[in-house]
Image: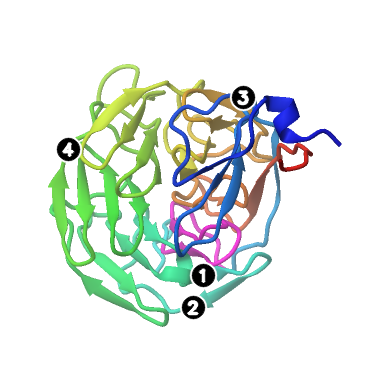
Amino acid sequence: MAKYKSLKGQPIQVLTADPPAPVEGQVWVVANPGTASVMKGYKSSIPAGTWASGGNLNTARAAAGASSGSDGSTSLFIISGGTPNSVNVEEYDGSAFTEIANVNNAGENGMSSGNGSTVATIFTGGNPPRAALTESWNGSSWTEVGDLNAGRGQAAGIGTQTAALVVGNGNTESWNGSSWTEVSDLNQTRRNNSGMGLSTLAIVAGGRTPASPAISNHVETWNGSSWTETTEINTARAEVSGSGVPYNSVIVYGGEPSIAKTEFWNGSSWTETGDLASAGSRISQNMGASATGTLAFQQASPSATTEEFTQGNVTVSFDID
């Protein structure tokens, strides 16, 4: 078997963080004191991902909130929802949903941020009417905590239970674990947009704008203090969902008008990959911290069916030298 050094002309680098501009085929190890070392590699072309059927919800619904752990197919919550408005919350263990404690306030188009049962979750906003209420999960029950400054639905929740963003309907609010603060607005006002990432590193794609054309293909990235426009998605869409953390592994999928297409972000451009089996809009937001394992559901009308996304792997064999 060929040695990596003989293939690439240099040994594998040991770094404290990912390199800022890796090249095709580059491999490195991230090592920091007190943490496990991780070997990583870069490939600009993305293998096709696929969707397959997941476990059904116990209660059919539309336009619910959702949050999950590092693997979107486990420790996942489906929260509230509409048509009719629901207070039900269900947790997914990778194969089946179980009903757990209800939220205090029912509503569709609410926003969730968090890591399912792993680290906990907040749920805020919703329609009708546009709500400002926020609820926090402690592992067994929901408690009302600090309200949003502006009530809203049809926005996106990003981040964790103690460091989150709500993005859409004209502005952005940041959560510090106890209260919301208005921060920098998006460059393009929109609602029904997707939102993926963390409170310090996020990406928003698609949505519905007040201007013509109403359905957007615009994408913006967040650096912790401001939004910057970047490469547009290939298919404009509203009521769109997404998963992942830039610039690691991000997908957007579904949307209006009846879109099944999924697109993968590699940090600079979008590539179409495997389609959903069922085209639809109002698919739940924030369904995973990575693209692989993402679970999608939610059509514009109530549904109990889900689909799970798996991204193909890039593999290479070599001896470390």
Q: How far apart are marks 4 and 1 (CA)?
A: 33 Å
- Tell me which amino acid carries mark 3: Glu
Identify the residue shown where x is 38% and y is 24%.
216
Q: Name the residue under label 4.
A: 184
**Residue contact between numbered discs 2 and 3, judged by CB atoms under 8 Å:** no
Q: Which of marks 4 and 2 is nearer the N terminus?
A: 2
Give coordinates of residue 233: x percent, y percent: 47, 24
Measured in 3D between alpha carbons, the distance from the residue under mark 2 to the one under mark 3, in whole angstroms, is 46 Å
Disc assigned to residue 100: 2
Q: Can residue 235 be seen in this view?
A: yes
Q: Nearer the viewer, mark 2 or mark 3?
A: 3
Residue 123, how many percent across, how many down?
33, 62
**Residue type indicated by callout 2:** Ile
> For the residues carrying marks 1 and 3, which lies nearer the camera in this image?
3
Is residue 83 covered in magenta?
no
Q: Residue furthest bottom?
A: 140
Determine the residue positioned at 53% across, 50% down: 298
Q: Which residue: 28% across, 58% down? A: 163
Looking at the rendering, the stretch of residues picked out in magenta corresponds to 59-80
136 left or right of 77 in image: left
Main secondary structure found in the magenta portion? loop
Q: In this view, does 178 lie to the left or right of 206?
A: left
Q: Is mark 4 on a helix, strand or loop?
A: loop
Residue carrying label 3: 24
Asked if residue 28 is positioned above or below residue 119 in the image, the reply reads: above
Marked residue nearer the N-terminal end (2 or 3):
3
Tell me how far mark 2 sits from mark 1, CA to CA.
6 Å
- Disc 2 vs disc 1: Cβ atoms closer than 8 Å? yes
Query: How far apart in space, not on screen, are marks 4 and 2 (Cα)?
Result: 36 Å
The kind of residue on which mark 1 rests is Glu
In terms of depth relative to the viewer, which is nearer, 286 or 284?
286
Lower position in the chain sequence, tag 2 or tag 1:
1
